[in-house]
Amino acid sequence: MFKGKKYKASAELIDKSKAYDPAEAVKLVCETSKAKFDETIELHVRLGVDSRHADQQVRGAVVLPNGTGKTVRTLVFAKGDRAKEAAEAGADYVGDTDLVEKITKENWFEFDVVIATPDMMGTIGRLGKILGPKGLMPNPKAGTVTMDVAKAVTEAKAGKIEYRLDKTNIIHCPIGKASFGEEKLMENFDTIMGAIIKAKPAAAKGQYIKSCTVASTMGPGIKVNSAKLG
């Protein structure tokens, strides 16, 4: 795979054989973000669990204290007063069967987070095969199936992110933009890592955090010393 001059220059700043302290890794990821656009900083955590087993799933949601730096578009499935509350809270799209039709027939995906009231889950059930693979299907564990749609919309807009294991037992999630600087990124890093550690399944045996890496959109991965993560 071809690597550009900026990537190579960034890679030279990193000792690939070293696992850095969290604060040092975050500082380095800021220094190696050299693209012309404001790069997203991502966290990748490999866990010592087996996602094939229901009792070893790690999934949840957390509001990052400094947000993600991304404008979040919210879609809410609700009726009556709940629909009104969602709209007043700033939801970008509110509806029920009309939006189900729009997604299924027009392949419409102009949204980043989907929220639904419990009574709407039967209506949007057929969207599971469409929204599921994209990680957009509402879920009670993530707080996106709720009667308090106004709170869910507000939190999503404020920088609430969902974390979940992929098939290789890795969690991938954004912790902000390079422009945030070290302090804000570190606050977000600590918040998401704290949530992941707290979500450790009782069935997990041995080392829980196998590896941890931070990286910018276009930059190289920087290994974090997992022994310093609690």
Image (cartoon, rainbow, N blue to C red):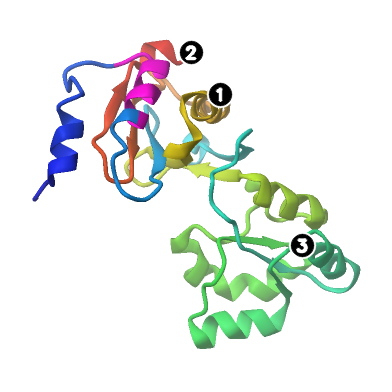
Q: Is residue 168 above or below residue 9?
A: below
Q: Residue flagged by tag 3: what amino acid is it?
A: Thr
Mark 1, secondary structure of its residue: helix
Disc ID at residue 230: 2
Q: Residue at x 64, y 73 (%)?
A: 124
Q: Are marks 1 and 2 in contact (CB under 8 Å)?
A: yes
Q: Is residue 15 above or below residue 217?
A: above
Which residue in the protein does label 1 denote? 194
Q: Which residues are magenta?
A: 20-30
Q: Is residue 124 visible?
A: yes
Q: Residue flagged by tag 2: what amino acid is it?
A: Gly
Q: Earlier in the sequence, mark 3 or mark 2?
A: 3
Using the image as rendered, state which of residue 69 and residue 153 is in the foreground: 69
Q: Earlier in the sequence, mark 1 or mark 2?
A: 1
Q: Position of residue 72 (x, y in %)?
A: 59, 57
- Mark 3, mark 1: which one is toward the viewer? 1
Which residue in the protein does label 3 denote? 117
Disc ID at residue 37: none
Q: Residue flagged by tag 1: what amino acid is it?
A: Gly
Q: CA distance from mark 1 to mark 2?
A: 8 Å
Q: Earlier in the sequence, mark 3 or mark 1?
A: 3
Side of 181 relative to 160 (left or right): left
Q: Does the magenta segment cover residue 132?
A: no
Q: CA distance from mark 3 to mark 1?
A: 28 Å
